[in-house]
Amino acid sequence: MQNMGGMEWPSLLTQYGPELLVASVVLTTLAVAFRRSLLGALTAIGGGVILYYGMYMQTNVSIMAALTIIGLTLLLLSMLGLRQRSDDVP
């Protein structure tokens, strides 16, 4: 593995993981909101909050896994709704 300033990639991802997750949820929400889909944007925000809570604020592993699956599913649903909406636009 290449070193970046003495740090390896896994340690960089561990250090900046929460910031990367928040940035990706914000970008996903903006992408859905720009398509004028309020329900999709709210779904993306809800999925992001649940995902963040499940990954970084939960100590019980079984609850962590369940919340992570729910959060990722909500984010996927918001993106699939965006795709269906863009197919309907002429």
Image: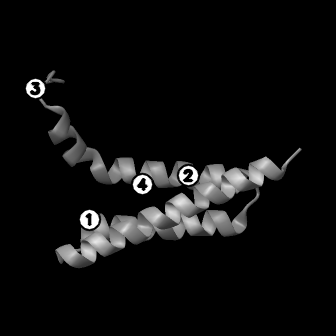
Q: Which residue is mark 4?
A: 22
Q: Which residue is mark 3?
A: 6
Tag 1 or tag 3, which sits nearer the N-term? 3
Q: Which residue is mark 1?
A: 56
Quick one: label 3, few (<14), some, or many (20+) residues within 10 Å? few
Q: Whole-percent x and y of residue 68?
A: 34, 67
Amino acid type, mark 1? Tyr
Residue at the image position 65 percent from the left and 64 percent from the top: 40
Tag 2 or tag 3, which sits nearer the N-term? 3
41 horizontally vs 20: left or right: right
4 horizontally vs 46: left or right: left
Q: Quarter of the image holding residue 1?
A: top left
Amino acid type, mark 4? Val
Q: Do residues under tags 1 and 2 come within 8 Å of each other at their CB atoms?
A: no
Quick one: label 1, few (<14), some, or many (20+) residues within 10 Å? few
Tag 2 or tag 1, which sits nearer the N-term? 2
Tag 1 or tag 4, which sits nearer the N-term? 4
Q: Quadrant of the C terminus?
A: top right
Q: Whole-percent x and y of residue 57?
A: 26, 71
Q: Whole-percent x and y of residue 70?
A: 42, 71
Tag 2 or tag 4, which sits nearer the N-term? 4
How far apart are labels 3 and 1 at the CA level?
25 Å
Farthest residue, direction left = 6
Residue at the image position 83 percent from the left and 52 percent from the top: 88
Tag 4 or tag 3, which sits nearer the N-term? 3
